[in-house]
């Protein structure tokens, strides 16, 4: 048995040296996963750029045209966090294509991971917070449109609320959005997910895991999704510069193992993406993201 992981070298592009987004983490994560010994081997898949018509299932044509053609207003570029470039467009389409491929692989194998993804702040008509296209929403809408599934659960454990995803799927019965995030963090104006669990600053491993365990099994039992998209953001870590929670490396692993085990034990396919993480120590950050893949390999190997 092998763990399917989706990766493309194009996940990493050049940014100015002082740019706050840790773009190198994707390259380093791929390097770490190639060097580490996991409980099972990795089967690497390479995505194609997401087709424009697929992106248009959740984003407006006007926004897509402006982004793809480099016609975003300067204020819109600032809100995105990136200066426009053709390389950025290709990177975003590859990352979204990666999440599409991850979900498709999960529906076949039961569990698959992307080595990027989790751009949950992107709205139908606007970018926000380093998120230009909402890969989670695109993947969910694509699977519904093609009849692969009838119900998708999005489990968002990034430290920031998945506001774009929540607004895109408001009153859409085929998608249930569950966001467990720091209450006093970006975005300042929260959306309304199907279920929001807002956490106090400084919450550590035990309290966090108990909170998660109090909600997730009930959601899975009540909604009975055909697939789960899991955003495993590591900005909940105690050393992350943009998160106000206090999970340790062990807590990250325990969280990811718990979510993946709950889905696996219920025979629900789960596609996982790495989400946010903003430590300036890029190697430490990549190591935190690798906890997801280690947990996934353990679930496949020891929970079979």
Image (tube, grey):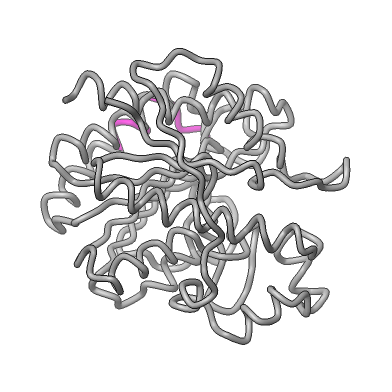
Q: Position of residue 1 (x, y in %)?
A: 26, 25
Q: Quadrant of residue 52?
A: bottom right
Classified by dominant secondary structure, the portion drawn in magenta counts as: helix
Magenta stretch bounds: 202-211
Between 193 and 276, the one nearer to me in the picture: 276
* Residue at position x 66%, y 38% in the image: 278
* Residue at position x 63%, y 37% in the image: 26
Q: Position of residue 169 (x, y in %)?
A: 37, 72
Between 188 and 236, the one nearer to me in the picture: 236
* Residue at position x 28%, y 71% in the image: 146
Between 246 and 114, the one nearer to me in the picture: 114
Q: Quadrant of residue 30?
A: top right
* Residue at position x 59%, y 30% in the image: 29
State whether residue 182 is above or below residue 290.
below
Q: Is residue 200 left or right of residue 285?
A: left
Q: Is residue 168 left or right of residue 302?
A: right
Q: Is residue 237 left or right of residue 69?
A: left
Q: Is residue 194 left or right of residue 75?
A: left
Is 285 part of what is drawn in magenta? no
State whether residue 28 is above or below residue 102.
above
Q: Position of residue 105 (x, y in %)?
A: 33, 47
């Amino acid at each position: 048995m092998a763990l399917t992981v989706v990766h493309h070298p194009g996940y990493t592009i050049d940014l100015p040296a002082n740019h706050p987004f840790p773009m190198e983490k994707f390259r380093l994560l791929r390097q770490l996963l190639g060097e580490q010994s996991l409980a099972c081997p990795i089967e690497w898949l390479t995505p194609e750029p997401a087709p424009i018509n697929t992106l248009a299932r959740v984003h407006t044509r006007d926004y897509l045209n402006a982004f793809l053609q480099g016609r975003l207003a300067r204020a819109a570029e600032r809100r995105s966090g990136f200066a426009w470039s053709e390389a950025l467009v290709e990177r975003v389409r590859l990352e979204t294509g990666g999440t599409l491929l991850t979900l498709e692989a999960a529906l076949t194998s039961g569990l698959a991971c992307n080595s990027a993804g989790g751009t949950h702040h992107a709205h139908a008509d606007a970018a926000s917070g380093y998120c230009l296209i909402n890969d989670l929403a695109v993947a969910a809408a694509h699977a519904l449109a093609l009849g692969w599934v009838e119900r998708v659960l999005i489990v968002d454990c990034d430290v920031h609320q998945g506001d774009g995803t929540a607004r895109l799927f408001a009153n859409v019965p085929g998608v249930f959005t569950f966001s467990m995030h720091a209450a006093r963090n970006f975005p300042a104006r929260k959306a309304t997910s199907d279920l929001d669990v807002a956490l106090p600053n400084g919450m550590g491993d035990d309290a966090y895991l108990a909170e998660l365990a109090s909600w997730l099994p009930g959601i899975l039992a009540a909604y009975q999704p055909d697939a789960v998209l899991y955003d495993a953001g590591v900005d909940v870590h105690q050393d992350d510069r943009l998160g106000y929670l206090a999970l340790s490396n062990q807590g990250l692993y325990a969280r990811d193992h718990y979510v993946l085990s709950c889905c696996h034990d219920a025979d629900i396919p789960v596609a996982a993406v790495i989400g946010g993480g903003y430590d300036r120590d890029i190697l430490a950050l990549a190591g935190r993201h690798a906890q997801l893949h280690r947990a996934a390999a353990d679930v496949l190997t020891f929970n079979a």
